[in-house]
Image (spheres, helix red, strand yellow):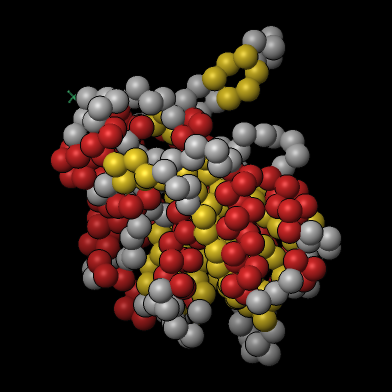
Amino acid sequence: MLARIAGTGSFLPERVVDNNELSQMVETSDEWIQTRTGIKTRHIAEDDTAVSMAIHAAKRAVENAGITPDDIDMIIVSTVSSEQNLPCVACEVQAALGATHAASFDLNAACTGFITAYQMAAGQMAAGLIETALIIGTECLSNLIDWSDRSTCILFGDGAGAAVLQAEDTGEDNKIISVLHSDGTKGNALTCSIGHGKDKTPFSDYVWMDGKEIYKFAVKQVPKVIKEILEMSGQTADDIDYFILHQANRRILEAIAKRMHQDESKFPMNVMEHGNISSACIPVLLDSLNREGKLKKGMKLVVAGFGGGLTWGGFYMEW
Ligand code: ACO
C-alpha cells in the first residue's frame, strides 16, 4: 500500500512585505537579512486567517486532484497559529468544502506538522481505514510575532498549502516509508505561549527562539533522518530527484546539501520569497513545483521537516 499525492493547492495572502519595509520598523537591513537567511520577501495576512487560507488551499488541492469533497475520508490540519481553538480548523475546512464523509482534526507538531499529517493519514491508509485524505499546513504566524523584535520578525510569513493523498494498492510489497522523531528536552529552543494562565489572567507571548541552537539542530538531525529514510527505501541520495525540506532559512538548506554531498539544485527553495511559514512551507513548495510541471511521474522525492518541540521527520515517495 502506498499513499500517493494526487493533487496540491496553496494560498498566500496578497500583501508582500519586503526587507526594506521591515528596516523601517526595526533596526535591520536588506543586506543583513539576505546574508543570514536568504529571505527577501514574505506574505503577511491582513483580512485572511489560518482558517480562510486553509480553505482556499484545500479547494485548490481538491480541484487539482480531480476528486469531489464527498471522496474525502479524513481532513488533517497542521497549525500552530490559528486564531481559534474551537472549532478546529479542519472542521471549518470540512464545512466549507461540504466534505460530509470526512473525519477532521488539527495537530500541532510545529514545522514538522505537514510530515506528521502525512504519516497519520498514510498509517490510516495502510490499516485499510481510509482511502482519501486531505492534509493541510496553514499558518498565520504574523499573529504570533513581536514586530519590534528584529531577531524573529524578519523570519516568518503567512500562508497555507494542501495535498490530497490517495491510497494506492500496488499489489507489490510496497511499504509506506515515513519517520517521525521528537526531543522535548530541547523544547525551550523555540517557544510561544498564548491564551490564559491557570489564574485566568490573559497572557500572550510571542515566538521566541534560540537561533543558534535551532540552526545546529537542523543541520545535524535533517541529514540523519534523510539517511534513515534512504535506508528504509533502499535508495541512495544520488537516486533522489528532489529533497523537499522545511524552508526555515537558506543557509540551513545549503549546509544540509553540502553535508550530504548533493547539488543544491536538488533542494528546491521558496524561503527567499515566502520566508518561513512553518507547517505550510512544504505543501506550498510542493504545489508550486507541481504546477510548474517540475514533478514528473516516477520521480523520487524525500520530504523532510524540522521544528519546535523539538520535532523532525520525513517520508519517501515516488510522484
Ligand atoms: N538585523 C540586524 N541585526 C540583527 C538582526 C537583524 N534582523 N537580528 C539579530 N541581529 C543582531 C543581533 O542583535 C546580534 O548583535 P550583537 O552581536 O550586537 O549582539 C547579531 O546580529 C548576531 O545575532 P545572532 O542571533 O547571533 O545572529 P546569527 O548569526 O545567529 O543569525 C539567525 C540569526 C539568522 C536566526 C540564525 O541563528 C539562524 O539561521 N538560525 C536558525 C534558526 C531559524 O532559521 N529559525 C527559523 C524558525 S525555527 C524553524 O523553522 C525550525
Depth check, front residue: 73 or 53: 53
Image quadrant in which the N terminus is located: bottom right
Residue 84 higher or lower than 254, as above or below = above
Relative vertical location of residue 196 with respect to residue 263 in this rendering, above or below: above
* x, y percent for residue 75: 71, 57
- Left or right: where does residue 287 sit relative to residue 168? left
Expressed as whole percent of the image width and height from the top left, the position of residue 18 reads 29, 42
Work out whether 73 lies above or below 39. Answer: below
Which of the pair 17/186 is nearer the observer? 17
Instruction: Place residue 199 in its image quadrant.
Output: top right
Is residue 299 rendered to the left or right of residue 52?
Answer: left
Q: Is residue 299 above or below residue 157?
A: below
Q: Return the x and y of residue 26 as percentages of the image width and height.
A: 27, 25
As drawn, which residue projects farthest toward the bottom?
Answer: 171
Residue 287 visible in rendering:
yes
Q: Residue at x 83, y 63 (%)?
A: 101
Residue 27 at x, y = what percent? 22, 25
Residue drawn at the location 27% of the way across and 47% of the way down:
40
Q: Is residue 231 visible?
A: no
Q: Residue at x 40, y 59 (%)?
A: 245
**Of the pair 266 and 294, the residue shown nearer to us:** 294
Q: Quadrant of ligand 1?
A: top left
Considering depth in this image, is 133 or 219 the residue closer to the camera?
A: 133
Q: Is residue 255 left or right of residue 298?
A: left
Residue at left 25%, top 55%? 255
Q: Is residue 303 left or right of residue 40?
A: right
